[in-house]
Amino acid sequence: MPRLLATARDTVRTQLWPLPVVGVLVAAVCGVLLPRFDAYADDSIPAWLDGVLFGGDADAARTVLAAVSSSLITVTSLTFSLTVVTLQLASSQFSPRLLRTFTSDVFVQATLGLFLATFTYSLTVLRAVRSSRNSAGAAFVPKMSVTLSFILAIASVIGLVVFLAHLARQIRVETMLRDVHQDAMATVRAVLKHRDDAGPQQTLPPVGEDAVDLLCPASGFLVRIDERDLFAAASTASVIIVVTARPGMFLVERTPLGQMWSPDGPIAAAVADKLQRRVAAAVHIGSERTAAQDVGYGLRQLTDVTNKALSPGINDPTTAVHALGHISSLLCELLDRDLSPVVLFDDGKQVRVVVHQPGVAEMVDIAITQPRRYGAADPQVMAAMFTLLADLARRAHPEQTHIVVRQLARLRKTVSAQDFDATESAQLASAAREVDNILSRHATAPD
């Protein structure tokens, strides 16, 4: 259930439209009800309050409401334009995968919601204003409603100024890296248990001789796996379901994403077909990766920013070094998380569902391989990668140190193939020895 809620929250949070639409609906309701309350309470408004409310006639009220509604729709168009320009900049300058980070910005959504709500409210209240010369009834000016429209207009002006300041801050690369890092850390902490809380390592059941492939229902990225639905299907049919595909992987329709088998013998064709349908309903395929269950998505974003900064068209190694710092922090967090397969048992302690997760070695390789290749000729980038390995060496558990050793050997080979001068070579050699020293101290440290 927590994973399902996290997925639903991520789906809504990364869309620009939900919050503005809610604002429009609330504003429309208020624009209908508040003038009625105005008419009901008109004779009982205290004198001190009546002195601060709108005091003009029907024509003045219409002028104010029309001015607010017309100006706010213009401001909203400007805000949308600035947002689109920012999205284009983030996509071309840094990475297309950063667009979800921008669209999930609650401040941008709230600002658009405020502007659209003010426009909708003012336009709705305008319907309730009546003057005696063109109405069969008495003149009516909803003082409180028009005053609220004026207040919302002032709030929108302030919101526009703050939005511009916020946008200028958001397009800074440091802010983008921080936001991606925070989102990735939130996903890791929500999806993965801490090593100390994971319990003993579970023994996985051997694959049965009569195992049947579980076929992917559609082509696309694996976004989410409903483990409870898989468990219910496996328990009902008394089978074992193993899902080897992991969130973030691109799957092709009708290709295997796992296997299922029964400890009691071959699975009947009718039962297998029913299980295939239930597994297909529990495996959610989408057109893009999301951070809901994909622990490698944030790492992929940070790596893409690093690669983009190292491209000849951008040539910004400083940004690459900053991104490697965030990558180092995220990898160190992953070292302390349990990345073993998720195993679900029934009441009889029989394994029913096994869901594989990405390994630490795979995550480290994703983060290091491409930046090492694209930044091989820059000594600052190579030094930052040695620093990254030193951080991992300090945090690695005994069974994880071989990952750092292998990556250190590959990085040394890359550096040796470059034409650095003597000073740069000496500095990088010293950085490599520091990693060796940390690994040595780590190996000899008492448990």
Image (cartoon, rainbow, N blue to C red):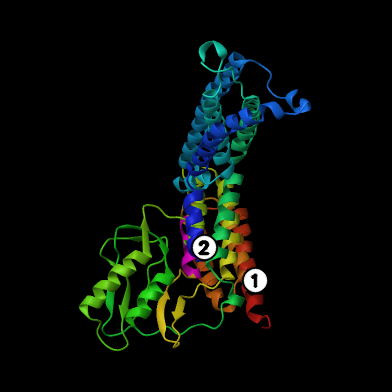
The residue pinned by badge 1 equals 438
| Residue at point 37%, 68% (across, down) | 245
x and y percentages locating residue 76 in the rendered image: 52, 29
Is residue 10 toward the left or the right of residue 49 in the image?
Answer: left
The residue pinned by badge 2 equals 411
| Residue at point 29%, 62% (across, down) | 217
Res. 313 visible in picture? no
Closer to the chain start, of discs 1 and 2, is: 2
Disc 1 to disc 2: CB gap under 8 Å: no
Res. 447 visible in picture? yes
Bounds of the magenta segment: 360-370
Res 316 → quadrant: top right
Determine the residue located farthest toward the top in the rendered image. 133
Inspect the image, locate mark 2, and give the three-letter code of the amino acid beneath it: Leu
* Picture layout, residue 193 above or below residue 64: below
Alpha carbon distance from label 1 to label 2:
16 Å
x and y percentages locating residue 409 in the rendered image: 51, 68
The mark found on residue 219 in the picture is none
Label 1: state its secondary structure: helix
Question: Magenta segment, principal secondary structure?
Answer: helix
Instruction: Assign the C terminus to one quadrant of the image.
Output: bottom right
Determine the residue located farthest toward the right in the rendered image. 48
* Picture layout, residue 67 above or below residue 221: above
Nearer the observer, 403 or 57? 57
Is residue 408 toward the left or the right of residue 47 in the image?
Answer: left
